[in-house]
Amino acid sequence: MLPANSRCGFTLIELVVSMAVGLVLLGSMLFLVTQVLTSQARSLQLSHAQEDAITALLLMTREIRRAGYHAHADEQWRVTPSLPPLFKVPRYPRTDCILFSYDANANGVHDGDTEQFGFRIHQRQLQQRQQGADCDQTGWQSITHAANVTVLALTFEPVQLTAAVLPLVRIRLRVTHPHQPQWVREYQALVTIPNGEVN
């Protein structure tokens, strides 16, 4: 039998100490969870930036490769070989802008502004030509999103290789994330233009 003056339970000091230990453990766990969530958010942001940049590079590569395409080029050349080509291979008014055209609907006729294409960097975003606009004009549409990626540099340069039969264009793209400027990535692609000729 227990003495009458013995108590069951915790003293006030024991409760305060156990609560303090619990709070320290809870604070540590919250700190770790916050760190993990912050790291995941940062990784997701960088993943979106990289995805935007690669998608834009693939789009530019695909479109530039079509430059000069004309559905009835063989027939036109056989009938009147002296006629200038309807559709243009890339022009480089500036190193950060490229202009070209191709027969997008394969009807063999130049349908005006709807078949004039190009890309440029403007206000740290990649833009695609709309309505036949020139490099310095308005009428371009952004193909990257300012919240996901900041374009630091874009260059288009013709590549002269002695053994090349077809023209080549090198695209260089350097990007960062708007909230993480220390993260910088560079991409490049070498594009063959099957519908052009090396002079």
Image: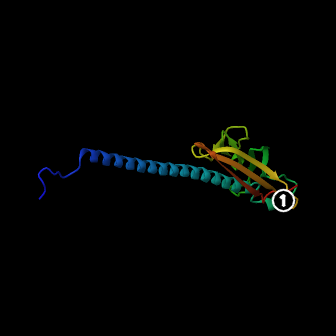
Looking at the rendering, which quadrant does residue 77 occupy? bottom right
Q: Is residue 110 visible?
A: no
- Residue 50 drawn at (x, y percent): 61, 52
Q: Is residue 10 left or right of residue 75?
A: left
Judging depth in this view, the residue of 85 and 154 nearest the camera is 154
Residue located at (75% from left, 57% from top): 191
Which residue is painted at 87% across and 57% down in the image? Answer: 81
Q: Position of residue 121 (x, y in %)?
A: 69, 43
In which quadrant of the rendered image does the C terminus lie?
bottom right
Residue kind at label 1, given as amino acid type: Trp
Give left or right: position of 81 versus 153: right
Residue under label 1? 77
Q: Secondary structure at mark 1?
A: helix
The quarter of the image holding the N terminus is: bottom left
Relative horizontal placement of residue 144, taking residue 95 as reference (left or right): left
The answer to whether residue 177 is above or below residue 165 is above
Q: Residue at x 35, y 48 (%)?
A: 21
Give residue 149's position: percent from left, percent from top: 61, 46
Residue at position x 87%, y 62% from top? 163
* Near-viewer residue (162 or 24): 24
Left/right of residue 27 with respect to residue 191 in the rendered view: left
